[in-house]
Structures are given as C-alpha cells and as structure tokens.
Image: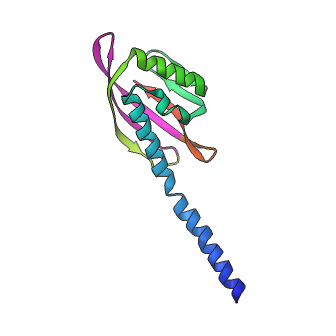
Amino acid sequence: MKNGKYVVIILMLVLNNFLFGQDSKPKDALKIFLRIEEGINDNSVDKFASYFSLKNYLSLNNSVVGYFSENQSYYILKDYFSINQPISFKLSNIITETANPFASGTLKFIQKGIRKTATIFISLQWIDNRWKISQITVN
C-alpha cells in the first residue's frame, strides 16, 4: 500500500511537470519577441543576438536573402539597421500558441534622411530545448 502511494505521487508530479511545463513555451516565445522588438527600437542587435540559431533565414529589402550563421546574421542586421535607422518598431501580430511561433510588425526608419516604413516578419523554432530565431524578413 505504501508503494502505491509513492507511485501515485510520482505519477502526479510527472504529469504536472508535463502538462504545466509546456505552458512556459508560449511565454518564453513572447519574451523573445518582446526582446527583439526592444532591440530593434534601440538599434541594438546585441539585445537579441543570443537567440539566433545556427542557420537563420534572412530576407531584407536591401537584396540580402539567404541562410546565414549566427555571426553572419548578427553583422548583416547590425549593418542593415545602421543604414536604415529605426525610429520605431511595434509588433502588432504575435502568435505563440503554435509549433513555430511568429510575429510581425511595422518598422519606421530613416534611410538617407527619408522616413520610410517596412513590415518585419519573425519566426522562431524550438531547438535544443529553447526558442531560436529561424527567420527574419523585412519587406
């Protein structure tokens, strides 16, 4: 009888961890999206560079398109935002309750003294038990 209680308790703990441990994934994805939003607003790729995956797909409106390493992605975006200086960036659509969370929003920036706007699309992928950026598109 005593062993039965332990089995039930262990089973409850495992189920609890499984059921409620999954709930943190959408929250974690949201935190990353907000960190990216903050980084772009502050013109600081450093704020979200740790979330780059080993291979990121970038498609920027300056003709940069392809898969890039973490390091390449960092420098490409750093260069992009130095030329296209962000005025504001606001995510308006964030979907975290999915296997591959994604978000999009409007970037207002200055390029050669002219104010412009673009839409940024970001998607995440679950890699090695954490969310990583898999794609950033700027149109």
**Residue in view at x 59 percent, y 24 percent:** 71
Front residue of 99/90: it is 90
The colour scheme used to paint the residues is: rainbow
Answer whether residue 6 is visible to the viewer in this image. yes
Answer with left or right where residue 15 lies relative to residue 121.
Answer: right
Answer with left or right where residue 46 lies relative to residue 93.
Answer: right
Answer with left or right where residue 92 lies relative to residue 68.
Answer: left
**Residue in view at x 60 percent, y 70 percent:** 13
Residue 73 occupies quadrant:
top right
Vertical arrangement, residue 111 with respect to residue 12, above or below: above
Locate residue 101, reporting x and y percent.
Answer: 48, 44
Q: Is residue 106 magenta?
A: yes
Answer with left or right where residue 40 lies relative to residue 23.
Answer: left
Report the number of discs: 0
**Residue in view at x 49 percent, y 33 percent:** 48
Locate residue 88, reporting x and y percent.
Answer: 31, 28
Residue sitting farthest toward the bottom: 1
Vertical arrangement, residue 71 with respect to residue 10, above or below: above
Look at the image and tell me in which quarter the C terminus lies: top left
Vertical arrangement, residue 116 with respect to residue 20, above or below: above
> Magenta span: helix, strand or loop, mainly?
strand
Residue 86 occupies quadrant:
top left
**Residue in view at x 44 percent, y 35 percent:** 36
Locate residue 57, reporting x and y percent.
Answer: 54, 28
Stretch of the chain drawn in magenta: 100-124
Answer whether residue 61 is visible to the viewer in this image. no
Locate residue 1, reporting x and y percent.
Answer: 70, 90
Q: Is residue 123 magenta?
A: yes
Front residue of 10/66: it is 10
